[in-house]
Image: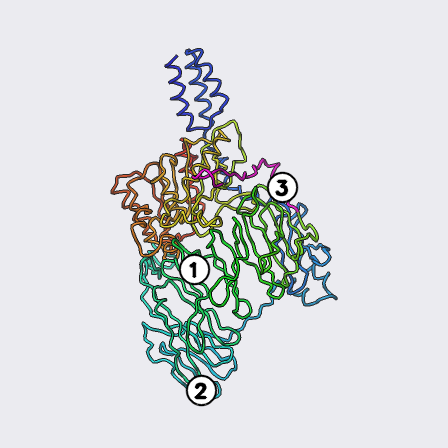
Amino acid sequence: MQISVQFYFSFSNFAGQTIVNNFVFKYIMTKLLIHPFLHLCCLSLMLSVSARAQVTKADYQRADTILNLEKLVYSPAVKAHWLDKSHFFWYQNREKDGTFFYLVNADTGKKNKANDKQGLTAFLKGKNKHLAGIITENKENIHRDYRQKGSLSVSPDSLWEAYIQDNNLYVRSTKNRKNVTALTMDGTVNLTYGSRILWSPDSKKIATVKTREVKERRIPLLESRPSTQLQPILQWRDYAKPGDVLPVSVPVLFDLETRKQIPLETSLYENQYELYLTGWRNDSRAFTFEFNQRGHQRYIVGEVNAETGKITHLVDEQVPTFFYYNNRFRHDLQDGKQMLWISERDGWRHLYLFGNDGKIIRQITKGEWVVRNVEYVDEEKGVIYFRASGFNKDEDPYHLHFCRINLDGTGFRDLTPEPANHEVTLSADHSYMVDAYSRADMPYVSVLRRTSDGSVVTELERSDISALIEYGWQMPEVFHAKGRDGKTDIWGKIIRPSTFDASRSYPVVEMIYAGPHDSHVEKYFRATDHLCSRLAELGFIVVKIDGMGTANRSKAFHDVCWKNLKDAGFPDRIAWIKAAASKYPYMDLNRVGIYGWSAGGQNAMAALLFHNDFYKVAVALCGCHDNRMDKIWWNEQWMGYPVDESYSASSNVDNAWRLKGKLLLINGELDDNVDPASTLQVVSELMKANKDFDQLYLPGKTHSLGGRFEMHKMDDFFVRNLMGVEPPAWE
């Protein structure tokens, strides 16, 4: 009896590498415990089941065409094209009977249908020929003011021109161009003036920046098979990396009447990542600038008094980790007497009202949710319209809702109350909005709303997915589970193949992108996920998850990435996958793989370095495997400055010796987003550590990897190493 049980478990481990019927296992287990002479019968049956695990050409053909399922979705999201400043808009709609165009009057909700855009003009002729022309020609009426062309800037009164010559700032009369004054004389190739020249509205002052230039690092890219010649071509790209010396710009101010520079105290701004001017006050009393300190832990909005040169800090954000400047927002009110500013100072991203003395007047939005972005501010009515997420307790906290609130902090209202992700397009005067809302597990509903109160004028379209259902398509599942702390909900989605059978056992593959600059699991409806559905069709359960360290949750949730990009939310991701497998036993946790692009490529390889007890197979595409090798603006934001030991701790290069499992590295020789040397340095260390791995180095390819060849190689790699079978031969 003991031998029988051991036989069962050893064979179940083998069969775990295949797609196996769970019922068969239960039956065999019962019989083995009763009758050991059934071994040969069991072996025959197991081999029969194992044979069903073969991935066929038909599976690959289905995977190759899976994206065509998008064509089976009728009446997808309405994309409104508002006509100039009117309350009319048009949209195109794909229906079972063909593609049609609709013109909608937002005031009445009435729709007119036509076979093409030209047909829509018939409904407007005689009412507004200008709008009819817009529909036919599909043009935008955009006005641009080119007061400054290159380094030449004309004063508002049109009497003077300011310009840069030999790296110095000059002014001359527009009436007599020989009347020239040099406002600076110290400009050199390494010390320049005037990347932007700003005249005060009264034409009496000029603000610009003085920049101490540096020679930027360049990286070499070798194009091995150019189309223009036989021999390779060496290319160069400007490419600053963490720790590099950066240019330093400081504001300077000139008085045109005296032809003199007004001294400014700017020593505080020497240690900088960036400083740029943001404009003059309408009454010419001051101009403003924004300053991002090197290391991204301090961000200042400064105001320079035009008479005295005194600098006042209207906002001075100082944080122990990082200031999330990617999503900063500022809006000046009453010509700068007050200012709206977005901040995470209470642990969540919210709106604050500041005075012109740098002090907070009030916090406008509050709660354990986040303001995602501000759409517009109605200063006259004292109302802010913005997108937010996370304020509904039982809803996916990443769903975008369109909201309003009064400047005094009262009157908060969700104008899009349905529990879904809302994509909103507003009319020019903000009176109406087209709201296309959906979820990953709910097709689109598109409605026309009044912006004042969110009331629905009319329903425009509702997606029809009946053809998808007939095909056998599987609805993605939105899934959430507790993260590493046992308290925080982690959200993601599960993608199953169209051939899904709950009685079978499936390997699990995670598509990962843990870049801290955003959250990454799509919240809108798609019939297919172009990065995941293909792999799912080959017989995998594919999952996508937003773990800790990504954005759009609390500041504490985001801060997990700080000087710790190797974390990538893995403890949360693993807990999530285990919770999903507990609910769905057909998810085989003995066969878990992972893949990703760019920062996701770094994450994918890191899974086999730091979490190889869980992840067994990884494909890393164009990965930034060492944050010291990658672009400065992205990496110093999360890993900090100066470069310290945390960079090494998160490096796939320095930790390559830890590798366990099957790894495929893919990158292109002309990648100017992530230095290709980053992957080659990984290869070097893997060789030194005598590690077995696979590499695909692609001639002529850039950072945009996703072509048929490399995707086929990735598919084969997972089929071979997670399913334990040989993929079909290429044709």
Q: Residues within 10 Å of mark 3 (few under 14, many from 20)?
A: some
Q: CA distance from mark 3 to mark 2?
A: 69 Å
Which residue type does callout 2 highlight? Arg
Q: Which residue is mark 2?
A: 177
Q: Nearer the viewer, mark 3 or mark 2?
A: 2
Front-most of 467 and 313? Answer: 313
Residue 216: % across, % down: 33, 64
Q: Which mark is residue 3?
A: none
Q: Nearer the viewer, mark 2 or mark 1?
A: 1
Q: Residue furthest left?
A: 688
- Mark pair 3, 1: CA separation: 48 Å
Residue 730 visible in the snapshot: no
Q: Amino acid at mark 3?
A: Ile
| Along the viewing direction, whichever of 507 and 174 lies nearer the viewer | 174
Q: Nearer the viewer, mark 3 or mark 1?
A: 1
Does residue 656 appear in the picture of this structure? yes
- Position of residue 590 in the picture relative to residue 352 (left or right): left
Marker count (numbered) = 3
- Residue 465 is labelled as 3
Nearest to N terminus: mark 2 or mark 1: 2
| Disc 2 and disc 1 in contact, CB within 8 angstroms | no
Disc 1 is placed on an element classified as: strand
Q: CA distance from mark 2 to mark 1?
A: 45 Å
Q: Quadrant of the C terminus?
A: top left
In the displayed structure, 339 sits above or below 663; it is below
**CA neighbours of label 1 inside 10 A, class few (<14), some (14 to 19), many (20+):** some
Magenta residues (range): 462-489
Tell me, yes or no, whether the two marked residues, 3 and 2, touch with CB atoms within 8 Å: no
The foreground one among 579 and 506 is 579
Return the residue nearer the eye: 39 or 304: 304
